[in-house]
């Protein structure tokens, strides 16, 4: 099995490390590489995949939306999401999937958070926010999207609130998910984390940022005694779902937990 992650830049990607561990632990033979592919070389890469050079790939920035029109088919849920992070090349066809949204839901379930009937507040309205918002809604959450650009928030479905309304909205949501780069190394911090104080006492705070692994948002949540989940949890879970599409082997929860711990220890 010949697999890779494509993007630009892609050298920093943890996907090769995660997928190689899945291969080792699941006894799946093959290779997984990081390949620099730009918007200009993407069509050529997909053609190579169709011709049998690759069995599958993961897709990262800035190609997740651009690859969609180049594929032969996309899973219906992925089409509504408008972004692809996994492609399988089979029988000369390229088929796309999005495992980011289901990965959010599954990683929360593994942390004991059952989404059905819960209220989720998603911060941001980019690709990750949209995938998370759609998957959480499908899993039975009432979803509110809070973003600084209202037109972008509207395309994520659910109720939308303005950035200024964040502290008021926080009080009504048992899950807060940060899908903005705020708090990521090299990006600005949240101007204020006061909204964490407004969250209900049993709220879960999920920060999709994973560099650093321990963000100021997570620390504020933990300081309040709330459950904080970091972005590495999604990185491992979306990879596990992608690995299942590639190989037909579903990495179990214990294996995902082991790999998550290895990544956390290495950061
Ligand atoms: P994206 O498509 O560029 O979307 C970023 C979103 O954040 C946009 O809604 C943007 O608003 C908003 N934003 C940016 N700067 C902001 C600021 N200063 N204040 C308020 N909102 C701001 O990016 P993405 O791919 O969705 O990724 C978002 C985050 O999730 C990143 O940190 C990424 O690393 C993380 N992520 C993690 C995983 C994982 O596996 N853990 C997977 C995917 C993404 P505008 O539209 O107004 O610019």
Image (cartoon, grey):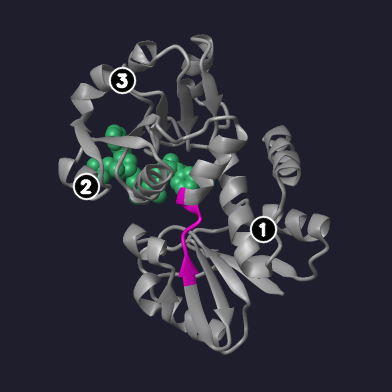
Residue 21 position within the rendered picture, expressed as x and y whole percent measured from the top left: 76, 54
Are the two marked residues, 3 and 1, in contact with CB atoms closer than 8 angstroms? no
Residue 236 position within the rendered picture, expressed as x and y whole percent measured from the top left: 62, 47
Instruction: Using the rendered view, name the quadrant where residue 124 is placed.
Output: top left
Chain-order first, disc 2 or disc 3: 2
Asked whether residue 14 is in view, the answer is yes
Asked whether residue 100 is drawn in magenta, I would say yes
Asked whether residue 245 is drawn in magenta, I would say no
Secondary element at image label 2: helix
Asked whether residue 192 is in view, the answer is no
Quote the CA–CA distance across marks 3 and 1.
Answer: 39 Å
Question: What segment is highlighted magenta in the picture?
Answer: 96-101
Q: Nearer the viewer, mark 3 or mark 1?
A: 3
| Crowding at mark 3 (Cα within 10 Å: few <14, some 14-19, many 20+) | some
Are the two marked residues, 2 and 1, in contact with CB atoms closer than 8 angstroms? no
Q: Nearer the viewer, mark 2 or mark 3?
A: 3
Residue 254 position within the rendered picture, expressed as x and y whole percent measured from the top left: 75, 41
Q: Which mark is residue 152?
A: 2
Task: Tell whether 209 sits left or right of 111.
Answer: left
Which residue is under mark 1?
16
Instruction: Using the rendered view, name the quadrant where residue 58 is placed.
Output: bottom right
Residue 101 vertical placement versus 115 (above, below) = below
Q: Image point 76% across, 40% down: which residue?
A: 258
Quote the CA–CA distance across marks 2 and 3.
Answer: 22 Å
Nearer-the-camera pick, 142 or 217: 142
Q: Image point 39% across, 78% down: which residue?
A: 70
The quadrant of the rendered image in which ligand 1 is seen is top left
Quote the CA–CA distance across marks 2 and 1.
Answer: 32 Å
Residue 12 vertical placement versus 164 (above, below) = below
Which residue is under mark 3?
172
Q: Where, quadrant-wise, is the C terminus in this rendering?
A: top right
Chain-order first, disc 3 or disc 1: 1
């Amino acid at each position: 099995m010949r697999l890779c992650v494509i993007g630009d830049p892609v050298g920093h990607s943890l996907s090769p490390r995660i997928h190689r561990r899945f291969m080792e632990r699941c006894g799946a033979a093959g290779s997984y590489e990081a390949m620099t592919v730009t918007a200009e070389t993407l069509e050529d890469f997909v053609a190579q995949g169709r011709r049998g050079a690759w069995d599958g790939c993961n897709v990262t920035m800035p190609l997740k939306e651009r690859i969609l029109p180049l594929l032969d088919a996309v899973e219906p849920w992925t089409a509504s999401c408008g972004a692809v992070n996994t492609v399988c090349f089979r029988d000369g066809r390229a088929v796309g999937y999005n495992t980011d949204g289901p990965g959010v839901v599954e990683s929360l379930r593994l942390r004991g958070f059952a989404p059905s009937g819960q209220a989720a507040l998603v911060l941001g309205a980019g690709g990750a926010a949209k995938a998370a918002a759609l998957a959480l809604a499908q899993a039975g959450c009432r979803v509110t999207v809070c973003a600084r650009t209202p037109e972008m928030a509207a395309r994520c479905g659910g109720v939308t609130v303005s950035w200024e309304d964040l502290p008021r909205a926080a009080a009504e949501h048992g899950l807060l998910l940060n899908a903005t780069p705020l708090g990521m190394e090299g990006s600005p911090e949240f101007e204020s984390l006061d909204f964490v104080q407004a969250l209900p006492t049993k709220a879960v705070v999920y920060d999709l940022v994973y560099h650093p692994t321990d963000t100021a948002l997570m620390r504020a949540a933990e300081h309040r005694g709330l459950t904080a989940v970091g972005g590495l949890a999604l990185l491992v879970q979306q990879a596990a779902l992608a690995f299942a599409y590639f190989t037909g082997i579903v990495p179990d929860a214990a294996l995902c937990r082991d790999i998550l711990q290895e990544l956390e220890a290495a950061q």
